[in-house]
Amino acid sequence: MSRVVEKSQSICWELAKSVETSLIEEVSLTPKPGLVDRKNNGSHEDMNYTLFIKSARTLTPFFYEMAQVAWTIPVSQPLREAIARIGREAEQAMYQATNQVNTHKGAIWSLGLLISVSASQLSQQGFICPETLFDEVALLAAFPDKAYQTDETSNDKKTTHGQTVQKQFGVSGAYGEALAGYPHVQLALKEDQVHLNEAKQIRNLHMLLAIIGSLEDTCILYRSNPETLTKVQQLANEANQTRLPNQAFIQLIEYCEEKQISPGGSADLLAASLYVQEIMNQNGLRLSVKTAHEKIKEFVSSERA
């Protein structure tokens, strides 16, 4: 095996381990409203902390494979189809490992796109470009998954919860977030910069609250209604204004427990944010504040148009 191949494999494995770390860091963040953490199962009867750890580690080889197929390959239709195939295999492995519990399906989508573009950029230019990372992710997401679309007999083609909510309430969901270049990931990264003098756990909580306070989370909508979502957003935004923990944060946790709702879409985006944060830190990169805020405004406007 050549040194070039060995180096590419090593880098791809490091990227995959960064994904695993981000997934574990997200579920380990304690306490969280309505979500599984170290001490609580949130609003989930079929999930727990141990199951999430098992799921995250099960997925690592598949994220490695995505990085490998993206190595030296530009964002394109063939790359989209290649990572989609691996993503479906990852979902099957997840369900097998969790006894059919959906722990990370949304994360497979978002982190699959992000790790693929990361590997593509690193292999072609030697670094990850913060100015184009999210634009290329949006471009990659826009290519159709032709194999999925043409396979009418696929067992995976049943309507997802996200698709049901998108149709019912007219929100864009995980696909729209990707097409917009992950504005809520960018928002979370900028929120982290506001709290650099605080402990990592508190910074991560602020990142999560920033996402919850803005995202039209399909996981919440599936279990409830727009009025409940608005209340969750209000409490999250209030909690994010002052030092944590605070009364609004406690109320948010209690409200999610009372309504049996879980901001699972926000959790997936926090994991994606933690991954981007890690690879940016490794490369000494930072996002533009202006870019992040402009993206989130554009996204919110398009959601409500």
Image (cartoon, rainbow, N blue to C red):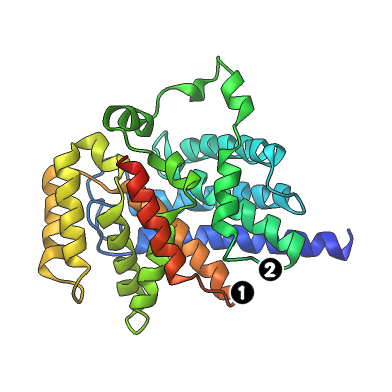
Q: Amino acid at mark 1?
A: Asn
Residue 181: image location, x then y, percent: 49, 52
Residue ID at (15%, 43%) = 228
Screen quadrant of the N terminus: bottom right
CB-based contact (under 8 Å), mark 1 and mark 2: yes
Secondary-structure class at tag 1: loop
Q: Quick one: which residue is furthest to the bottom in this view?
A: 197
- In depth, the one of 250 and 214 nearer the eye is 214
Residue ID at (43%, 22%) = 158
Mark 1 or mark 2, earlier in chain: 2
Screen quadrant of the C terminus: top left
The residue identified by callout 2 is 127
The residue identified by callout 1 is 283
- In depth, the one of 142 and 276 nearer the eye is 142
- In depth, the one of 221 and 20 nearer the eye is 221
Q: Is residue 295 left or right of residue 148?
A: left
Residue ID at (49%, 48%) = 110
The relative height of residue 54 versus residue 280 in the rendered view (above or below) is above
Residue ID at (39%, 48%) = 51
Q: CA distance from mark 1 to mark 2?
A: 7 Å
Q: Can see residue 38?
A: no
- In depth, the one of 29 and 298 nearer the eye is 298
Secondary-structure class at tag 2: loop
Q: Which mark is residue 82?
A: none
Q: Quick one: which residue is furthest to the top in this view?
A: 153
Q: Amino acid at mark 2?
A: Phe
* Mark 2 neighbour class, 10 Å CA radius: few under 14, some 14 to 19, many 20 or more: some
The relative height of residue 242 versus residue 71 in the rendered view (above or below) is below
Q: Can see residue 258?
A: yes
Q: Is residue 225 left or right of residue 272?
A: left
